[in-house]
């Protein structure tokens, strides 16, 4: 399609034709269905978009934080634990690719156990292994070689680089992101189906008017344009309202926090607040395509 042809259709879609617009009922069931469908789908699309962005941020954060962190566990008798901890710290600080290594304090280990045993857990009375936090440098360390050296010099040391459970967590976040994208596509498809039903109902209800217009020389493209314009603008208006309520709902959700976890971070950040503004435009595009197909098919049947 040429640029002039597209511009002409766009101007016709916006300006319309007063006589052709009378073909489409300005109110009633089809108008209410179009407005409600567009508004509801835009509302759901905002939350699906927020879920997609939040899942992406979560996957990136988990991948970045867990990829550079490891835990060294010292399983040794109480009388040997301090000596083995010191030996392990010495080895870690000598290992290329290890940015830092530090032993957890008793208070920090008690805080880790507090969700299961309570805040007043007697850490000294329990056979709790000593934990050492290991932060990886760029390009990283040789985990296999480090395990072999620790096994030889610190028998009670067990290195956990989080590989076993890091990948499943990141995959789960990515899967949630893909699910949100699929939800957006399904929302668009459902919106198109509802608007097609509304357009078909309006065309069927105005069959006699369409026949009269044909008798006086009106082309099918002229008649179809009236339906396309009315339903596209209805969908655009409904989507704006639904988008507004959706953004308000997202804005009212709790802000992201370490204590609240993922659900409190389900929202937009920075430039992400501009993305929902695309939803009404996409809704109007879906309505345009759906109404065009419905009008052309229905007018062909009425021939």
Image (cartoon, rainbow, N blue to C red):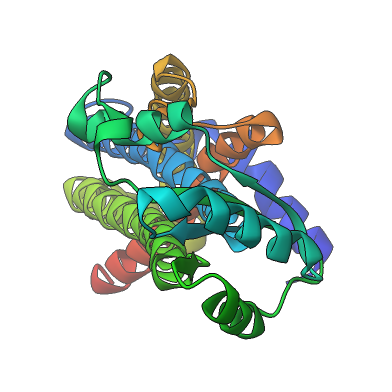
Q: Is residue 199 left or right of residue 55?
A: left
Extreme-front residue of the structure:
79
In which image quadrant can residue 97 be found? Answer: bottom right
**Residue at the location (54% across, 70% down)?**
154
Tag count: 0
Q: Nearer the viewer, residue 215 or 155?
A: 155
Image location of residue 40, percent across then percent down:
30, 34
In which image quadrant can residue 117 be found? Answer: top left
The quadrant of the rendering that contains the C terminus is bottom left
Q: Is residue 143 left or right of residue 256?
A: right
Image location of residue 139, percent across then percent down:
81, 71
**Residue at the location (19% across, 53% down)?**
204
53 relative to 152, above or below? above
In which image quadrant can residue 64 be found? Answer: bottom right
171 relative to 198, above or below? below
Image location of residue 239, percent across then percent down:
43, 33
The quadrant of the rendering that contains the N terminus is bottom right
Q: Nearer the viewer, residue 2 or 207?
A: 2
**Residue at the location (44% across, 57% down)?**
177
**Residue 137 seen anywhere in this rendered image of the structure:** no
Q: Nearer the viewer, residue 68 or 128?
A: 128
Q: Nearer the viewer, residue 35 or 1?
A: 35
**Residue 134 seen anywhere in this rendered image of the structure:** yes
Image location of residue 51, percent across then percent down:
42, 44
Q: Is residue 238 left or right of residue 203?
A: right
């Amino acid at each position: 399609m040429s640029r002039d042809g597209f511009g002409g259709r766009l101007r016709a879609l916006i300006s319309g034709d007063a006589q052709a617009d009378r073909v489409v009922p300005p109110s009633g069931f089809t108008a209410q269905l179009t407005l409600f469908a567009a508004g509801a789908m835009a509302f759901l699309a905002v939350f699906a978009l927020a879920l997609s962005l939040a899942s992406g941020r979560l996957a990136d954060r988990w991948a970045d934080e867990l990829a550079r962190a490891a835990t060294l566990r010292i399983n040794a008798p109480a009388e040997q634990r301090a000596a083995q901890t010191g030996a392990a710290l010495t080895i870690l600080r000598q290992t290329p690719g290890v940015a830092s290594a530090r032993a957890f304090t008793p208070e920090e280990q008690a805080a880790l156990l507090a969700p299961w045993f309570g805040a007043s857990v007697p850490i000294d009375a329990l056979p709790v292994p000593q934990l050492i936090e290991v932060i990886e440098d760029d390009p990283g360390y040789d985990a296999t070689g480090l395990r072999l050296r620790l096994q030889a010099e610190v028998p009670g040391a067990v290195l956990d680089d989080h590989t076993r459970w890091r990948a499943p967590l990141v995959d789960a976040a990515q899967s949630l992101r893909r699910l949100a994208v699929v939800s957006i596509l399904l929302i668009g498809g459902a919106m198109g189906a509802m608007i097609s039903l509304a357009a078909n109902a309006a065309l069927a209800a105005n069959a006699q008017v369409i026949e009269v217009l044909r008798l006086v020389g009106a082309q099918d493209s002229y008649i179809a344009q009236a339906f396309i314009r009315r339903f596209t603008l209805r969908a655009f208006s409904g989507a704006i309202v639904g988008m507004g309520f959706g953004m308000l709902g997202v804005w009212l959700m709790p802000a992201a926090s370490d204590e609240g976890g993922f659900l409190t971070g389900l929202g937009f950040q920075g430039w992400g607040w501009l993305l929902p503004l695309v939803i009404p435009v996409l809704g109007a595009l879906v309505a345009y395509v759906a109404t065009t197909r419905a009008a052309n098919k229905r007018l062909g049947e009425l021939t």
